[in-house]
Every structure is written in structure tokens, then in C-alpha cells.
Amino acid sequence: MKAFIPFFSLLLLLNILACGGGDASTAESTAVEETEVPNDIAGAIKQAQEVIAQTSELQEGEPLNFRELQAFLPEKLNGLKRTAKSGQTNGAMGFKISQAEGKYETSDGSTIKIDVVDTGGLKMGLMSMAAWANMEIDREDDKGYERSTTLNGFKAFEKYTQRNNKSELSLLVKNRFVVKAEGREVAMKDLKAVVGDMPLGDMK
């Protein structure tokens, strides 16, 4: 379960939204009101409701349940058999994020792990998990390389680390879903073949 977004991480993300969301005038009013801490439950609830109202536009829709996401991780991808699957849907303060994971075994016994995350269009979630989508990246040295690219029309990001011979491939689908595949002792072309066999066009 280490690959999943823990529930406390989601709470931390939403706390950042609550503290950092809004424009300059909102930040100024927040600073002024810092001394006006409610001393009762009703006051605390009211402040929480105001925060939710201010940030509700940051998530555009309801994410799919993780069981629905698992449909994008079929029993076989590019001829490789799925050996494990898991998932979770977490939420707080009216925001939700879902994640499904599948593991596939290659012919030489290596494992390709694929995560599918549905942010529901949560902008801060996308900024955190797919910041590369709005950047042009191309760097390489003796330790490996990183580059932004495209795969089947979707924005993508490749990363290879020489030290542990690890390949990683991430895609942003419909500005909402983040797909990440990774494997040790697995060539990037093999990751691309597996991810390219996923029914990404059916994500909606």
C-alpha cells in the first residue's frame, strides 16, 4: 500500500488548499482574522464551511470509485499477466481522490507497477502529481535522464535512473487522470508498450 496516497496526505493537501487558496485579498483577510479564532464548535464549523465554499471550484467533478478505475488495469496488458491489484478512494472536506494499482510480470520475472489516479479535476492534485505537464523538460547525465514527451496523444513524462536501473513513465489523461508506470530492469520501450495497451481513451 506504500504506493497509494495515504489519507493523511490528502488531509495535508486539503489543508494547503484551505491556507493557500484564493487571491491576495483573501490572504489579507485571512491574516487579519487570524486572531479571531472561534472558541466554540459552531464557530469552527462555520469557518470550515467558508473555506469549502471558497475552494469548491478547485475540484471540477466527482472522481470514479477505485473499483471503476481497476477496469483500466485488465488481467493482461501487452501480453503480460496481472499478478496483483488494489485500490482506494479517500476524501475530506468535500474533496476526493481515487487510486488503483496493478502489477504485471514480464517474461524475465521483473514487475511493472501501474498506478491510475483520478483527481476529479482537483487542480492542486494535478499540480502535485503532474507538474511536468505544463513544462518542457529534456535533461540527461551519467545518472540518467528526464524528458517531457507525448504518448498516443497524451502529455507524458519519462524518467530513467541509472543507479537502480529504474524506468518511470507518467501520463496525464483528459486533464484529470494521472497514469504512472514504473519498473526496475524494465526498458522504457516496454513500459510504453504496456501503457499504450491500456484503454486510456475510455477514461471519462
Image: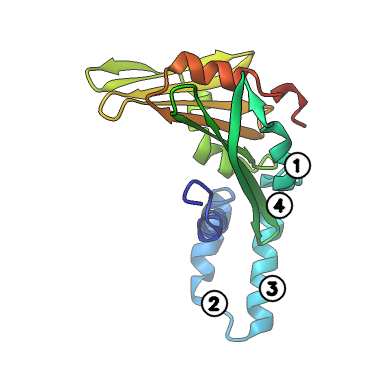
Q: Which mark is residue 68?
A: 1
Q: How far, Cα to Cα, is label 2 from label 4?
A: 23 Å
Disc 2 is placed on an element classified as: loop
Relative placement, left or right, of 143 versus 63 is: left
Q: Mark 2 or mark 3, which is nearer the start of the sequence?
A: 2
**Which numbered disc, 3 or 1, marks the residue closer to the eye?**
1
Identity of the amino acid at label 2?
Glu
Disc 1 is placed on an element classified as: helix
Q: How far across and how far down the image is residue 86, in percent?
A: 61, 47
Report crowding for label 2: few under 14, some 14 to 19, many 20 or more residues within 10 A (C-alpha). Answer: few
Nearer to me, 155 or 101: 101
Q: How far across and how far down the image is residue 71, in percent?
A: 73, 35
Q: Mark 1 or mark 4, which is nearer the start of the sequence?
A: 4
Q: Residue drawn at (64%, 70%), measured in percent from left and top?
A: 47
Identity of the amino acid at label 4?
Ser
Q: Which mark is residue 46?
A: 3
- Find disc 2 in the rendering and name its residue: 36
Report crowding for label 1: few under 14, some 14 to 19, many 20 or more residues within 10 A (C-alpha). Answer: some
Q: How far, Cα to Cα, is label 4 from label 3?
A: 15 Å
Identity of the amino acid at label 1?
Glu
